[in-house]
Amino acid sequence: MRIGIVSDTHNNLKNVRKIVDLFNNAGVDRVIHTGDVTQAKTLAVLADLEAPLFGVFGNNDQERDSLDAAIEQFGFHFCEPPLNLIWHQRNIIVVHDPLEFDGNLGRQDLALHGHTHRYRNELQEAQLIFNPGECAGMIPGLNAIGVVDLETLTTSLIKF
């Protein structure tokens, strides 16, 4: 199973349209947003994903009424962090701010976060901590999303 990882889209609709195309072309099975969607119109663009969308809320997701309505409308799965998942026999934890890992990293195979806008790909013993980094920036080629292969617990970065 291959999952797409995106964070901190911050309502950059041009980039979000590109992200949707990149994930659809990559053929990911699911997509995880690690927070800071910001506005419901971003979720309307993400509705064009060919894979189900899961995620957590970030510190800039202040418009909760409109976000919650869009999440329900499009059938997405979002919650306050941490989001704990078991996919492909892997324990996954999703938070926005890496400080939210505090005390929650125990038996997780994969730990995903956003917030910092910085790439992170650390293997600590049998646990992978991953953040694809910036995706809402204005400079082409410096934005990125990630794909994680849950079978091998390997990552790839897609820059755009």
Image (cartoon, rainbow, N blue to C red):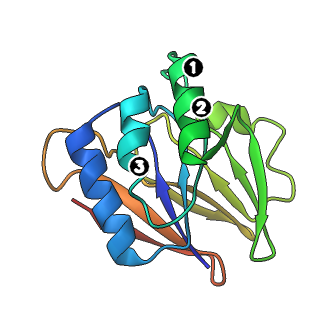
Three-letter residue code for mark 3: Leu
For the residues labelled 2 and 3, the Cα–Cα distance comes to 15 Å
- Residue type pointed to by label 1: Arg
Q: Residue at x 37, y 70 (%)?
A: 24
Q: Residue at x 51, y 66 (%)?
A: 51
Q: Position of residue 44 (x, y in %)?
A: 39, 41
The answer to which of 101 and 69 lies nearer the viewer is: 69
Q: Which residue does the numbered mark 1 point to in the structure image?
A: 64
Q: CB under 8 Å between callouts 1 and 2?
A: yes
SS at circle 3: helix
89 relative position to 64: left or right: right
Residue 32 visible? The answer is yes
Locate residue 104: give its quadrant. top right
Q: What amino acid does circle 2 point to?
A: Phe
Q: Residue furthest bottom?
A: 152
Q: Rounded to the nearest whole Å, what is the CA distance between mark 1 and mark 2?
A: 9 Å
Residue 22, given in percent of the width and then of the height, sits at: 31, 66
Quadrant hosting residue 79: top right
Residue bearing the label numbered 2: 57
* Residue 9 seen from this side: no
Say above or below: 146 vs 96. below
Which residue bears the numbered disc 3? 46
10 Å crowding of disc 3: few (<14), some (14-19), many (20+): many
Q: Residue at x 43, y 40 (%)?
A: 43
Quadrant housing the N terminus: bottom right
